[in-house]
């Protein structure tokens, strides 16, 4: 991912960029909502937003209705970066789908989503195999 983005002129890719930029492509979002969506603390969300802001990919502004709320939005440079990230992810997904059997890819996706949710797959496997004896 980083190498492909570097070839496109984005030498400063960070792992948190992909998820956050794809989220911000939907429009401005209060910083307080970023943490739960990305499954990070408020401090982690703030750090990721600060990183984007320092690189001029995002900016923050007080909400017009509720001044306690700090909204995060993409800059035009950030929109271009987000588009590049989406295109690279699409390319990588296409390449992977051409190398891996669809059934294997589907099984891997189930495992990865379960791990990301913190599910214990060993218990599921045990429960499924116990019923077959």
Image (tube, rainbow, N blue to C red):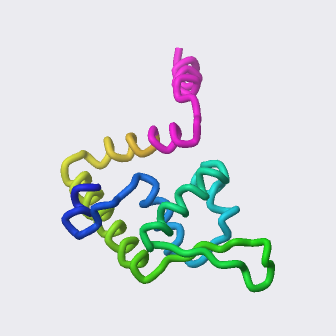
- Residue 123 located left or right of residue 14: right
Instruction: Please tell me which residue lies in front, 81 or 87.
Output: 81
Q: Does the stretch in magenta take in 66?
A: no
The vertical placement of 66 against 93, above or below, is below
- Residue 125 to residue 46: above or below: above
Is the residue 82 above or below the residue 18 in the image? below
Pick the residue in front: 69 or 18: 69
Location of residue 77 by image quarter? bottom left
Residue at horizontal 51 percent and vertical 37 percent from the top: 115
Query: Which quadrant of the structure image shows residue 80?
Result: bottom left
Q: Is residue 112 magenta?
A: yes
Q: Residue at x 58, y 42 (%)?
A: 117
Residue 32 percent coordinates (x, y): 70, 62
Question: Does the magenta stretch mainly form a helix, a strand or a loop?
Answer: helix
Q: Which residues fall within the magenta stretch?
A: 111-133
Q: Residue furthest top?
A: 133
Residue drawn at point x = 57 percent, y = 29 percent? 120
Q: Position of residue 107 (x, y in %)?
A: 39, 41
| Left or right of residue 64: residue 9 | left
- Residue 14 location (% of width, % of height): 39, 55
Q: Is residue 37 left or right of residue 111?
A: right
Along the line of sight, which residue is nearer the eye, 81 or 127?
81
Residue at 59%, 51% in the rendered image: 44
The quarter of the picture where the N terminus appears is bottom left
Q: Position of residue 68 (x, y in %)?
A: 79, 72
């Amino acid at each position: 991912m980083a190498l492909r983005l570097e070839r496109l002129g984005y030498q400063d890719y960070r792992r948190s960029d992909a998820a956050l930029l794809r989220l911000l492509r939907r429009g401005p979002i209060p910083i307080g909502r970023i943490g739960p969506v990305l499954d990070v603390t408020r401090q982690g969300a703030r750090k990721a937003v600060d990183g984007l802001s320092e690189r001029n990919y995002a900016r923050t502004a007080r909400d017009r209705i509720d001044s306690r709320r700090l909204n995060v939005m993409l800059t035009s440079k950030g929109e271009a970066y987000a588009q590049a990230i989406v295109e690279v992810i699409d390319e990588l997904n296409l390449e992977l789908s051409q190398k891996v059997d669809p059934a294997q890819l589907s099984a891997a996706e189930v495992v990865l989503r379960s791990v990301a949710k913190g599910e214990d797959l060993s218990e599921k496997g045990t429960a499924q195999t116990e019923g077959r004896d």
